[in-house]
Amino acid sequence: MVENVPVISQVLDHPDLSRPSEVPAGAALDMLGPAQEDGRTNVELPGPDATAAKAQVEAALAQASAARELASQEHQAVEEERARSASLQSALSESRKQIDALKTSMAAAGKASEERLRNELLAARTLDALRWIVQDARALLDRTIDNVLTRMPAAYLERQRTERMARDLSQAQMQTERLEAKAAEDRATAKASLVQASRMLDEERRKSKDLRGDIAEMEQSKAAIADTAERQRTGAATARERVEQTAAETARALAREQASAVSIQENLNKARIERDVAEQERAKAVAARERAEQIAKETAQALEHERASAVSTQDDLNKVRLERDAAVQERARAVAARERAEQIAKETAQAPEYNRASAVSTQEDLNKARIEQEAAEQERAKAVTAKERAEQAAAETAQALARERASAVSTHEDLEKARLERGTSRALLGQVTRLNEALDKQREATVSVARDLAAVRADNDKLRAERRSAQVEPPLKPRSGRASAGKDQVKAVSQKTTRNKVRNSRVIRVRSITLPFSLRPSRPTLD
């Protein structure tokens, strides 16, 4: 993702793109034709044909500048679409890496190296694809520069550039659609793994229920044997009290296990509810993405019909930007939904381990109960051995409690890991805000460049006006006699006034440039 972000800055810093494609002043003057040359030979104001030709030339220059600005805006839209596709691709690669990590944790330890190699191969392929895209963009840029410098006139050049940018936009949209299809496949695999994990959890739950039934039967048989042992035994009162104490401890342990099973069921229900909410949010994100794609297609069709009016083009671009912001928000929601799904997957992955531990503890309790039953049957003749076995059962109960404490510690560690992952997600959000700030700075730089361009164009207009005013016919030869002196003075005064009028009218014709909405400054300026 870091390699794909500076593409916009590289394109804007390119000397061939940042250089304005102005029509030379000599060519503009040559385009005026013989009308302007005829105007030079006359002392009076130019005729209507010359003024009409000048107006047409100025209108053509204004249309060329408007087409150039439109092409630059479309080029920026294409670059933003490419940046968005690159960010989607990076997000997709991150989700794939996380899914692969989940698969490796659930699979055997021997498959870790193979999964790592697959991830590296996938990253290399994506990097190679991005390099090919950059090479194609550079080749397209070289071809456009060659066409600008050699063959095409200004208006046709701008039209061809807009068509190329529209094609690039369609290609970027196709690439985003392919990436979204890959993301849908990855989501399907994640759902399948989640279903498999839920099945394993149901099997573990069924086994724990069977073990609890066996424990209940053993408790009933143990009570009957204890009654018979109390009738027949007279010299083993101390051992019997210890056996009853261990039985009470096992009953308390079973009660705690039942409470933990109830809490696990509640957590599982909460996880299912959160999963349903995440699926709904994912469906909303997909619908929003489809709307964004449809809007992008509509804007691509509108760009072909927008060459006649610049105002409608600006409005459509503003709509595209607003919907792009909405798509960015929907993408953030999809990322949050993905994090929730990952958390649910982690909790479902931890639940079978906890149920296995509970099943192991219940199996141990069952073994203890069987040992106690055998001890009760043997207590009729051997009270000492019954005492030792009771002590052994107490030690095993202590070990089971230690294992429960270890499982609680592991659960606490998992919670700490989840908090750390939340911190990393916040850091990523901070990086996104910094990138947005960098984009705003780049926009301000483009605004300053546009201002400089406007100043240069104003200077060029002034120079052209001065050149036109300087190309006035030299004065006539003076006549002999005093009678012609007054007439010459009157004509000279009239000529000066007409020249000053022409010069003032030509100097006032400074072309004003209207910046698009995206390039307008956010703060008021002195200009």
Image (spheres, rainbow, N blue to C red):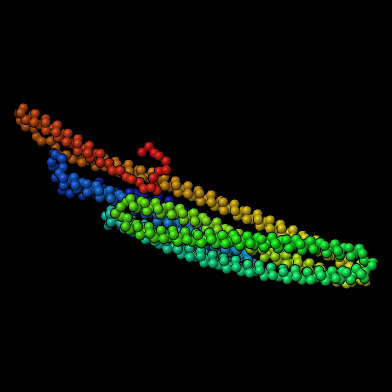
**Residue 76 placed where, x, y %?**
39, 53
Residue 181 vs 472, above or below: the answer is: below
Residue 270: x %, y % from top left? 63, 60
In the foreground, 316 or 346: 316
**As drawn, is 25 to the left or to the right of 382?**
left
Query: Residue 8, position in %: x, y?
Result: 42, 52
Q: Is residue 139 visible?
A: no
- Position of 107 relative to 499 (above/below): below
Q: Nearer the viewer, residue 270 or 304?
A: 270
At 13% from the left edge and 41% from the top edge, which residue is drawn?
42
In the rendered structure, the answer to whether residue 282 lies left or right of residue 507 reads right
Instruction: Give whichever of 458, 505 is nearer the camera.
Output: 505
Quadrant of the rendering where the C terminus is positioned: top left
Would you say 319 lies left or right of 362 here? left
Classify residue 366 by image quadrant. Answer: bottom right
Residue situated furthest right in the rendering? 235
- Residue 502 at least partly seen: yes
At 59% from the left and 59% from the top, the residue drawn is: 274
Which of 61 and 277 lies nearest the eye of the viewer?
277
